[in-house]
Amino acid sequence: MTFRFDDAVIAGVLRHMNADHTADNLLIVRAFGAADATDAVMTGFTGDEATWTATTPDGPREITVAWPGGSISERPQVRKQVVALYDAACERLGVEPRPHE
């Protein structure tokens, strides 16, 4: 069964990703399903996957990507999995990833 995070956790992660990591959002959606995206907003996540809405020339498109490390159920794991998605996106697109703190 898919783990569902608390609404406050989801809101906090989405706020952070959409305010501080807009370029990362775009990189992830370009690598995992919307190569022509011009913008992307993270719209949700569960213990199994994360979802973004990509802006494309053909209109909005929902992109859902499974967590690379498998299912999660704790808030600190979300950051690790988003970083893993970012790294995988960089690898797919041939982009040098920035260092992680």
Image (tube, grey):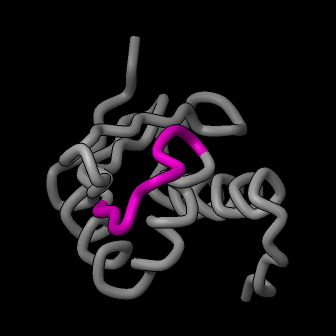
> For residue 64, which quarter of the picture?
top left
Q: Quadrant of the N terminus?
A: top left
For the image shown, how many numbered marks are present on the structure?
Answer: 0
Q: Say which residue appears at 73% left-offset and 88% top-offset.
A: 101
Residue 53 vertical position relative to residue 79 in the rendered view, above or below: above
Where residue 32 appears, as percent x and y from the top left, is 57, 42
Q: Say which residue appears at 54% left-offset and 37% top-offset.
A: 72
Does residue 33 belong to the magenta stretch?
Answer: yes
Q: Say which residue appears at 33% left-offset and 68% top-offset.
A: 39
Does residue 89 belong to the magenta stretch?
Answer: no
Q: 41 or 101, which lies in front? A: 41
Q: Say which residue appears at 59% left-offset and 38% top-offset.
A: 67
Q: 89 or 37, which lies in front? A: 37
The magenta segment is 32-41
Q: 26 or 69, which lies in front? A: 26
Where residue 37 appears, as percent x and y from the top left, is 41, 57
Residue 55 vertical position relative to residue 6 in the rendered view, above or below: below
Classified by dominant secondary structure, the portion drawn in magenta counts as loop
